[in-house]
Amino acid sequence: MRIFIRVVERGSMSAAARDLGIGQPAVSERIEKLEAHLGTRLLRRNTRNMSLTHSGNVFYERSKTAIQAAEHALSVNEENQALQGKIRIAAPYSAGESLLMPALLQLQIKHPELQIDVIFNDRIIDPVTEGVDISLRLGEISEGFFVARPLGSVHRVLLASPSLLAKIGYPRSPDALADYPFAAVSGVFASNRIPMLTSEAQLVNVPVNVKFQSTHWRSVLSYLLAGHAIGVLQFPVCRNEIAQGSLIPILSHYPIPPFNAWLLHPPAGMMSYETRICAGLLERYLKTSLSEMMEYE
């Protein structure tokens, strides 16, 4: 059941084999024996893809319930024991590197035998349907078969280097931003407009002149530090540069709406003991970190 569940969630036998630390032929053999034992085909397989049959879908749902129930029963004396096994966590690049990684380091110190597999990807990842145990997500979340724990807010800051401001001056109003070169993380401001709040708390979309885009926030940070543009970054990734004065917040009286931060995990009945403990520890650490950053600001 465990092997079958991992094959379904990872989408291939080779990926499941890597996660489980066994060979792909062994995985294929176990699935074939399982199908023979059940007397039905669970997976449709060809050279390009793999999909569940109706029987496979039913068996997958029932297997997850059975495995979770068994793990819950076996954890009766594990509350004070160190965690083992592997946990897979998905997160966006910026929040993952600046917020999640310090939390994971603390988690590893507390549970040194735990194997941690982190997937950094700005694409939205559902922990139930995409084979991860926990997902850190920013922004609005849609409905899904998962539990979303609110963590707080991740603030965003409009920034420029002192050298750029000395060269072309401070923008005095949001309308002036179109006269400045702008650097952005790809896909964040797809319409070449940034949202800002007026003193009356009205949301306005301000046009910007995008001269540089990158799929990773660190490239945008380097571009801003070099004095080539103004840009928006999440506060956790630029707090040190602000404190050092190498980047200066501009138009702070027109704040950019923050992102809500969430920790997503499967419902209790589908969650392993390790996931449950890790989710609780990460939630407490991340809530504290975001609260402290708000005080720092």
Image (cartoon, helix red, strand yellow):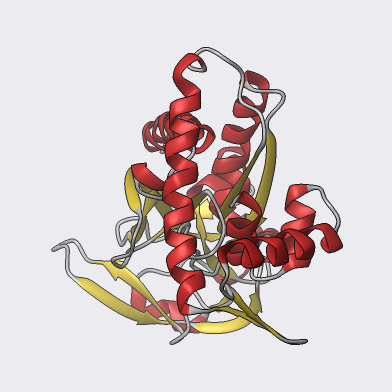
Q: Could you tell whether 281 is left or right of 241 in the image?
A: left
Q: Could you tell whether 191 is left or right of 247 in the image?
A: left
Residue 220 x, y percent position in the rendering = 65, 66
Residue 49 appears in the rendering? yes
Residue 226 appears in the rendering? no
Q: Residue at x 74, y 49 (%)?
A: 20
> Is 100 placed above or below 131 here?
above
> Is 44 placed above or below 248 here?
below
Q: Residue at x 63, y 48 (%)?
A: 97
Quadrant into which the C terminus falls: top left
> Is 180 placed above or below 135 here?
below
Residue 290 x, y percent position in the rendering = 41, 38
Q: How many marks?
A: 0
Residue lying farthest left?
200
Residue sitting nearer the eye, 8 or 262: 8
Q: Residue at x 57, y 33 (%)?
A: 103
Q: Could you tell whether 231 is left or right of 175 in the image?
A: right
Residue sitting nearer the eye, 243 or 276: 276
Residue 93 x, y percent position in the rendering = 61, 58
Residue sitting nearer the eye, 151 or 22: 22
Quadrant of the rendered image containing residue 172: bottom left
